[in-house]
Image (cartoon, rainbow, N blue to C red):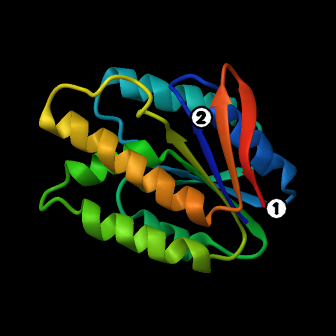
């Protein structure tokens, strides 16, 4: 099963996706895409880790090679939770030799082939004004395209606002 959880910053999407993973009854693997580049991001990572404290998660750091990580860990007895796609997108857009095209195609090709329960979490950033600056517009455009392509193949798509989930697609 492939699920996509979308929502704004601090919408509750990660918490709800984690609850969904806990309810799966499967072995849980948390795939973290964040890189702690500054104090604020370090605090955000610590907040997410604190939320999972006392739960049985294996945490895997994968800031860039997401498809490779998913391929390695996916199996019928596991639930993989990726948090979050937009951080991974940022990492790929700003990587040397701009690896975004290859990384995104690898992920989109692999997702339908994976076994087990896969939950992807991502920030919905395309509901505001068109941002200033070429890289900012590209980020919004690429995340929107990625979300559309994943939603097309996902079994379930959920939009989260104020901690309330709205199921957009149920399969």
Write down the quadrant of residue 98 in the picture: bottom left
Q: Which of 62 and 6 is in front in this view?
A: 6
Residue 68 visible: no
Residue 17 vertical position relative to residue 72 in the rendered view, above or below: above
Mark-to-mark CA distance, 2 and 1:
20 Å
Which x, y percent locates residue 11? 60, 24
| Kind of element beneath mark 1 | loop
Which x, y percent locates residue 86? 41, 43
Marks 2 and 1 close (CB-CB < 8 Å):
no
Q: Residue 26 carries which label?
A: 1
How many discs mark residues in the rendered view? Answer: 2
Residue under the image location 44 percent in, 28 percent down: 127
**Left or right of 60, for residue 142:** left
Q: State which quarter of the image contains the C terminus.
A: bottom right
| Kind of element beneath mark 2 | helix
Q: State which quarter of the image contains the N terminus.
A: bottom right
Residue 34 vertical position relative to residue 27 in the rendered view, above or below: above
> Which residue is label 2 attached to?
49
């Amino acid at each position: 099963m492939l699920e996509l959880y979308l929502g704004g910053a601090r919408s509750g999407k990660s918490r709800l996706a984690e609850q969904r993973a806990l309810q799966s009854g499967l072995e849980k693997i948390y795939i973290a895409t964040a890189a702690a580049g500054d104090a604020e991001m370090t605090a955000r990572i610590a907040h997410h880790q604190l939320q999972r404290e006392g739960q049985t998660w294996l945490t895997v750091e994968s800031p860039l090679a997401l498809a490779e990580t998913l391929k390695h860990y996916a199996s019928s007895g596991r639930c993989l939770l990726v948090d979050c796609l937009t951080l991974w997108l940022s990492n790929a857009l700003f990587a040397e030799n701009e690896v975004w095209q290859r990384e995104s195609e690898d992920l989109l090709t692999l997702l339908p082939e994976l076994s087990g329960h896969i939950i992807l979490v991502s920030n919905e950033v395309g509901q505001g004004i068109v941002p200033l600056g070429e890289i900012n517009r590209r980020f919004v455009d690429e995340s929107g395209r990625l979300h559309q392509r994943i939603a097309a193949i996902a079994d379930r798509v959920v939009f989260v606002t104020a901690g309330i989930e709205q199921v957009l697609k149920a399969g």
